[in-house]
Image (spheres, rainbow, N blue to C red):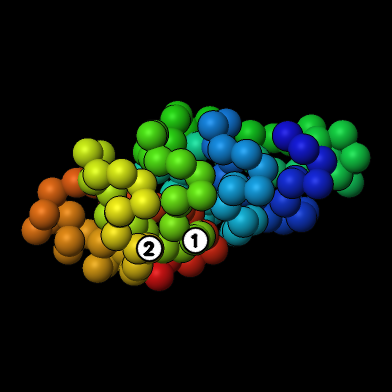
Amino acid sequence: MPPDAVPQLGLCRIWYADLPPEWQPPAMPCARAHSLAEKHGGRVVKAISPGSFRDGRTLSVDYGPSHFPAVPPEQLPPPGYCRPWYDRIPADRQPAPMTCERAEQLVKKNGGRVVYMPGPEQK
């Protein structure tokens, strides 16, 4: 992983192979990262030493692919938020990001799926 994206010592980060570095979720407590990745996919990475910040080598656990295929990175919700997503609607006509509770209500009512971008806390 890019050395400048390695989370600080004591924290973890979920890393998605299909997203550019600037669209990756922020660092968070490791227990939260593992819990979210187990549910939503991704690779949890953790610095193994101060050298990780020079060479990008990390410890990691892969929980599988992300749950947001076919969603352009610029359309992903901000970390900690969700977005209802309807596969047959163009990206520029999708509902705006919102709280996960609200997104889940809309998807339950109208169909579609919930796209979630992991963050230090859920909104």
User: What is the total number of numbered labels drawn onto the structure image?
Assistant: 2
Outermost residue, left direction?
A: 109
Q: Secondary structure at mark 1?
A: loop
Q: Earlier in the sequence, mark 2 or mark 1?
A: 1
Quadrant of the image containing the C terminus: bottom left
Q: Residue at x 31, y 44 (%)?
A: 90
Across and down, in percent, residue 33 comes to: 53, 50
Across and down, in percent, residue 46 comes to: 69, 44
Across and down, in percent, residue 86 comes to: 23, 45
Amino acid type assigned to the residue bearing label 1 in the image: Pro
Give the crowd class for mark 1: few <14, some 14-19, many >=20 residues within 10 Å: some
Amino acid type assigned to the residue bearing label 2 in the image: Pro
Between 22 and 38, the one nearer to me in the picture:
22
Quadrant of the image containing the N terminus: top right
Is 96 above or below relative to 118? below
Across and down, in percent, residue 101 comes to: 26, 67
Q: CA distance from mark 2 to mark 1?
A: 7 Å
Between 8 and 67, the one nearer to me in the picture:
67
Q: Residue at x 77, y 54 (%)?
A: 9
The residue carrying mark 2 is 97
Q: Is residue 38 visible?
A: no
The residue carrying mark 1 is 78
Q: Is residue 118 left or right of residue 46?
A: left
Q: Secondary structure at mark 2?
A: loop
Q: Are marks 2 and 1 in contact (CB under 8 Å)?
A: yes
Q: Is residue 83 left or right of residue 33?
A: left
